[in-house]
Image (tube, rainbow, N blue to C red):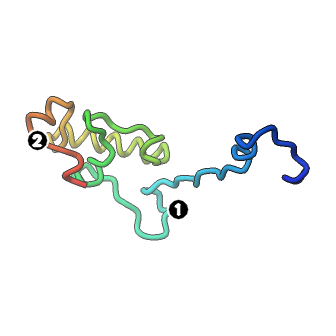
Amino acid sequence: MSADSRSFNDESDKESYFQRRPRRRYCEFCVKNKKADPKIIDYKNLNILSSYIDDRGKIDVRKRTGACAKCQRKIATAIKRARHLALLPYTIEHIRLSGFSSKNHS
């Protein structure tokens, strides 16, 4: 069935049919999906880890980070290790007291 033979009731039906699908996001950490060198997940690399923490100090979900399940678990473990060693803040209150901002380390 071609687009010409379809009957559209109004312009919005036509627009919704011809919308482009968003590009698939690939994990930045996986070697198989990356042409260049992949990022390394390490608890000492605060620049990368702080970009996966929101303003309130929570770890971002997979949908927002774009990481695969395996890499998301590694990110969460690395963030928890960095928090335990006081390299990253636990909560918003710790952010206020220390002056730490994830935007400054990016």
Q: Secondary structure at mark 2?
A: loop
Q: Is residue 39 above or below residue 15?
A: below
The picture quadrant where one finds residue 45 is bottom left
Q: CA distance from mark 2 to mark 1?
A: 38 Å
Query: Disc 2 vs disc 1: Cβ atoms closer than 8 Å?
Result: no
For residue 72, the mark is: none
The residue sitting at 33% across, 53% down in the picture is: 41
Please, what is the three-letter code of the amino acid marked with disc 1?
Lys
Q: Position of residue 92 (x, y in %)?
A: 20, 31
Q: Look at label 2 and name its amino acid.
A: Gly
Q: Is residue 29 left or right of residue 16?
A: left
Disc 1, SS: loop
Is 96 left or right of 105, judged from the image as shown? left
Q: Which mark is residue 99?
A: 2
In front: label 2 or label 1:
2
Considering depth in this image, is 50 or 31 the residue closer to the camera?
Answer: 50
User: Is disc 2 surrounded by few (<14), some (14 to 19) or many (20+) residues within 10 Å?
Assistant: few
Instruction: In the rendered view, tell whether residue 73 sits above or below residue 42.
Output: above
How dense is the environment of label 1, judged by Cα within 10 Å: few (below 14), some, or many (20 and up)?
few
At horizontal 29% and vertical 53% (from top left) the residue drawn is 48
User: Label for residue 32?
Assistant: 1
Query: Tag count in the figure?
Result: 2
- Quarter of the image for residue 62 reads top left
Residue at point 64% right, 50% down? 21
Residue 83 location (% of width, % of height)? 20, 38
**Residue ID at (33%, 45%):** 52
Image quadrant for the C terminus? bottom left
Rendering coords of residue 76 (x, y %): 34, 40
Which circle's residue, 2 or 1, is located before the other in the chain?
1
The residue furthest left is 97
Q: Identify which residue, 70 or 22, lies in the foreground.
A: 22
Please state if 3 lies on the left or on the right of 58 as rendered. right
